[in-house]
Amino acid sequence: MAQRQIKMDRNDKSILIRALHASYRAQKEQGQPRPAEGDLLLRIHATEPGRLSLNDEEYHMAFSALNRLRSERLATGGCTDAADSALSRLAHAKQPCWLFRI
């Protein structure tokens, strides 16, 4: 599994936690909690702003949660600047380049 490195400041961390929490809460109400999403939420909360490493599954969970939050805010006429910024940083996350394989 490839790790993606994401530059994350306080605003991105906050909106990502909010998006993942809303997604986790909605799935829990339906009776289908995903423990991986809860673990990711706790790990992001414990991480200091800076760089965040996500594997492919975590990357897709975070991307879909942010996209869902953005869609909800657009539907209600809310501001999407923070979600747009976090989505942009997530979309530009890079996989590390290894010149040599061991």
Image: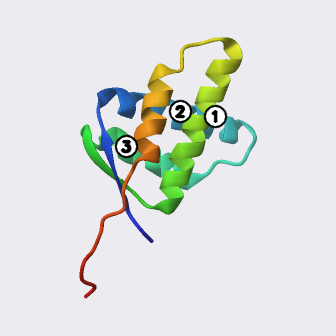
Q: Quadrant of residue 3?
A: bottom left
Q: Position of residue 50 (x, y in %)?
A: 24, 41
Q: Verify CB contact (< 8 Å) between mark 1 and mark 2.
A: yes
Q: Position of residue 40 (x, y in %)?
A: 45, 49
Mark positioned earlier in the residue sequence (2 or 3)? 2
Left or right: residue 44 compared with residue 87 = left
Q: Residue at x 67, y 35 (%)?
A: 26
Q: Establish if 41 lies above or below 53.
A: above
Instruction: Report the amino acid beneath label 3.
Output: Ile
Residue 68 image label: 1
Q: Residue 71 or 88: which is nearer the viewer?
A: 88
Q: Residue 61 or 35: which is nearer the viewer?
A: 61
For the N terminus, give its image quadrant: bottom left
Cα–Cα gap, marks 2 and 3? 12 Å
Left or right: residue 8 compared with residue 30 = left
**Circle 3 crowding by C-alpha within 10 Å: few under 14, some 14–19, many from 20:** some
Local SS, label 2 = helix
Instruction: Report the amino acid beneath label 2.
Output: Ala
Q: Which residue is mark 3?
A: 44
Q: Which residue is mark 2?
A: 19
Q: Residue 32 or 71: which is nearer the viewer?
A: 71
Cα–Cα gap, marks 1 and 2? 8 Å
Mark positioned earlier in the residue sequence (1 or 3)? 3
Marks counted in the figure total 3
Q: Residue furthest bottom?
A: 102
Q: Residue at x 61, y 51 (%)?
A: 34
